[in-house]
Image (spheres, helix red, strand yellow):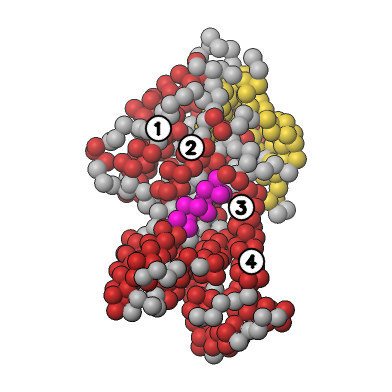
Amino acid sequence: MTRRMNVPVLAMLLRPSPAIVVMMIVLIAWAGYLTVIAPDDLRGPYIVLMLCQAFAASTGYAIRARRGHFDQVLAGRRSRVRFALTHVSVSTLIGAACWLIISMVDAIGAGGRWPLGLTPRALGSFVYLSSLAWASSVPFSRYSAGVLWLILAIALAASGRLLALRNSYALAADTWTGVWQAAGPALVFPPIVVGEPSGPPNIVIVLLFMAAAVAVAAGVAFISVYDLALEDRE
Amino acid sequence: MNARCALVGVSKQYGSHWALRDVTLTATSGEIVGLVGPNGAGKTTLLRIAARLITEQAGAVDVPSSEDGKVRYFAGERALPADVRVRRWRRLWTLDADESAGRKRIGTLSRGLRQRLGLETVLAQPGSAAVVLLDEPWEGLDPDASAWLSHELLAMRAAGAAAIVSSHRIHDLAAICDRCLFMNLGRVVRHVEFEPAVMANRAAILLEAFEHARTEGAR
């Protein structure tokens, strides 16, 4: 099949569940409500959206591929790179659109202040989380990365390490040691970057974007070389 | 006739199991090649390697790129996404809407209807196909749909496509194929070629060859 079928086929097969769509609409409404009662602090909707995006971008690939769902678009292709890039774009689109809308709502309510969602640190953490969620789910099924990330978040919170990560990030000085103190928490639990009012060293933001690029490259490489042997067949 | 699809000395191993060993198969323009063999013979693996969905470990595969829609492949009704609505799937592949399907999902259709739907989306695409690869295409089809499929394949052959069709339905295959390869335990063990004008006894010839192929493979 032709390359122009990438987008319509993937948009149909990877479409978000109604629960995720409803959740994102609720988040936009919550952001709108906050712009009226507390326009200076919209961190809540951004952080919850990151959790939603961990599920929404976690569209999975290998399980569907082994069932043959992508056969018609992949048959005869010498390279799957373009397909893989379309896959990551379609998977992360709804969360990115919601992030943009909340940022616009934030901008309207902020009265001239640059919205949090469009600051480099927030964008870096959102792009990193989206890419990681997508790439982590590629070898597995839908929502696998979201579930893993939720388990990690609960485990960190239950063991008290989430607070330690937050403190490590918040107290990081603008030195090389401080960079590592901030980078660890930002990479393990990206919502910290959005939740903490203090900005990280610029190098941490660069690291987040680089980690996102590595995650996407790993996912694309997996899709490119993965053998699509059919499940449940002779 | 030039080879539209050529697999030369292809081997594929899963763990310690050889799914294919040194298999060579070519299909030329305007030719239908049948693939016959018991379950586990390697037919599906061979077709998926030809479709570039699986990478061969040894040998060479020469199939046109699908970037221009020249390669059509169908693995059977189980390869269709059960959670998608029939109407949307048909529209996606630019088929006429089937009003009788209503808002049904693909997974709720009968096996035969799913098979027909999948074949339609693969075969009834606009534009000409260079290579058609079908895995057990007659499975689950009723006589009318079987006749439709055979007619479509003959039309594609007349239009210059090269088709490789694996099937256990010897009679259906005998009616349309120009030659037939018999596989067992990952090898091609027998090869039967038909005279184009002779239609009589084809199924009997294939059945006899199948029996020989089974014993040759077991040896």
Discs 1 and 4 share one subunit: no
Disc 1 versus disc 2: nearer the observer: 2
Which is nearer the eye, A224 or B214?
A: A224
Residue at x 65% of width, y 17% of height: B2
The Cα atoms of the two marked residues, 1 and 4, are separated by: 49 Å
Question: Which comes sooner in the sequence, label 3 or label 2?
Answer: 2
Looking at the image, the residue that sits furthest to the front is: A112
Query: Element at badge 4?
Result: helix
**Host chain of mark 4:** A
Would you say B125 lies left or right of B217 here? Answer: left
Q: What's the residue type where badge 3 is placed?
A: Val
Q: Sequence-wise, which precedes: disc 3 or disc 4?
A: 4
Disc 3 target residue: A220
What is the C-alpha distance between the residues marked 3 and 4?
A: 21 Å
Number of numbered markers: 4
Give left or right: position of B76 versus B219. Answer: left
Q: Which residue is mark 2?
A: A4
Residue B3 vs residue A136, the one in the foreground: A136
> Which residue type carries mark 4?
Val
* In the image, residue B134 lies in the stretch drawn in magenta: no
Looking at the picture, does residue B156 appear above or below residue B195? below
Label ID, residue A206: 4
Image-based side of B167 in relation to A95, left or right? right
- The residue to which callout 1 is attached is B120
Q: Which of the two residues, B141 or A80, is positioned nearer the viewer here?
A: A80
Q: Which chain letter matches label 2?
A: A
Please give the chain letter of the residue carrying mark 1: B
